[in-house]
Image (cartoon, helix red, strand yellow):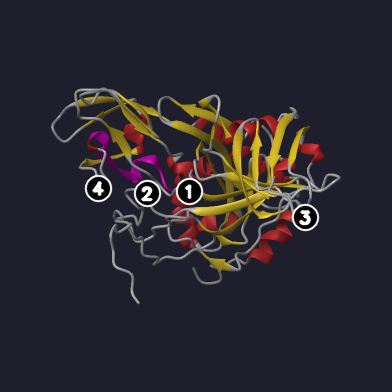
Amino acid sequence: MSGKKTEKSYAEINQRIKKGEALVLTAEEMIDFVDENGEDKALAEVDVVTTATFGAMCSSGAFLNFGHCDPPIRMGRVWLNDVMAYAGLAAVDVYLGATEESEIKGVEYGGAHVIEDLLAGRKVHLRATSKGTDSYPRKELDTYITLKDLNQAYLFNPRNCYQNYWVAVNSSDKMIYTYMGPLMARFGNASYSSAGQLSPLLNDPYYKTIGIGSRIFLGGAQGYIAWEGTQHNPVRERNQKGLPVGGAGTMAVIGDLKEMSTEYVRAASIEKYGVSMYVGIGVPIPILNKEMVRYTAVRDRDIDVTIVDYSGGVRDNPTLGQVNYEQLRSGTIVLENGREVPTAPLSSYNKARKIALELKKWINNGEFLLEKPVENLSTNSQFKILKEGAVPNV
């Protein structure tokens, strides 16, 4: 290796992007490149690997600012198409949660659907009430708005892009309805939700390049990682390749809703469970050293995931062994007892592939530069459970 460069910097890579000289590969393409050329050549030639995922991300929502009407109102309770938004912020600011359900339509329509309607340019019914004050005398407002009418509208999603997750099955004698979709009785199906070898945090398992301030693809626009996501759990059990075998790291993300697209932000109603929102996220990973070459050459067969029986309705559901994503994508897995179970993804691998390619195009066109994190995601956060009935310290 004498004389060979073993480290790159963000500045060097961004300079190559600006000059149109950067070699950008998707995570799928990186696997083939390393197989054919080896790690040394990959480090020397590849600058960026694009990763992506597209799946149901319930912990999502949008901050909206409506501007002031005349006479003005200090909104106390707010509904958008009969979906309640949280108004405890300021006079005309709200946070609309993706999973909040319509007071009329229930699970068929919720906050995610309002966000999609706004993105699609549709008019949304805004209704607000207030106690009235001297400076904000108005007590009721009933009107219609569009996305263009709003001062600010931005997604702020507290928990997206799970680093791996569980495979869900059901051992009971009846169908159950979960956030992983319907699970048929007696192991009739297995549901999973990850882009596997394309997934961002599985291509950077120890968050060496992904952190606060990282520029990302979010919903069809450029966005940022704002913080570690809620329920971030980096100390989850990992396999021999350092990859977590269940839900581990997460990230909170932010971006301008007005620049996004309904192709990458979609509402969903999960049968007899609730409302969710599908979000498309793409993360560029700079190839800074050989360690990042190895991480971004991860294959589906390298990524193990734990099978969990959801039938008990308890926090710590029983586990039934592990499989990898190559087995999951084959359409059938085999449980420890030898039973064959058909599999189906809740997420879309094809859409994740499209996002990775779109992000690659942005970088190749010089429209997207890499941003070094101001702080990396935590690698030692301790995940806590809710202890009921605990006596507070005085």
State which tag comes first along the sequence, 2 or 1.
1
Q: Residue furthest bottom?
A: 394
Tell me which corner region of the image, top left, top right, bottom left or bottom right, holds residue 211.
bottom right
The magenta-colored residue range is: 297-311
Q: State the separation of the CA atoms marked 1 and 4.
A: 39 Å
Density class for disc 1 (Cα within 10 Å; few <14, some 14-19, many ≥20) is some
Residue 325 seen anywhere in this rendered image of the structure = yes
The reply to whether the magenta stretch includes residue 303 is yes
Specify the label residue 316 is tagged with: 4
State which tag comes first along the sequence, 3 or 4.
3
Q: State the separation of the CA atoms marked 4 and 2.
A: 13 Å
Q: Amino acid at mark 4?
A: Asp
Locate residue 307, reporting x and y percent. Answer: 26, 39
Q: Which residue is mark 1?
A: 34
Asked whether the beta carbons under mark 1 and mark 4 sit within 8 Å of each other, the answer is no
Looking at the image, is mark 1 or mark 4 nearer the viewer? 4
Looking at the image, is mark 2 or mark 1 nearer the viewer? 2
State which tag comes first along the sequence, 1 or 4.
1
As helix, strand or loop, the secondary structure at mark 3 comes to: helix
Q: Which residue is mark 2?
A: 247
Viewer-nearest residue: 216 or 124 = 124
**Left or right of 350 on screen, residue 155:** right
Q: Amino acid at mark 3?
A: Lys
Locate residue 151, reporting x and y percent. Answer: 79, 47
Q: Amino acid at mark 1?
A: Val
Asked whether the beta carbons under mark 3 and mark 1 sit within 8 Å of each other, the answer is no
Asked whether the beta carbons under mark 4 and mark 2 sit within 8 Å of each other, the answer is no
The reply to whether the magenta stretch includes residue 173 is no
Tell me which corner region of the image, top left, top right, bottom left or bottom right, holds residue 388.
bottom left
As helix, strand or loop, the secondary structure at mark 2 comes to: loop
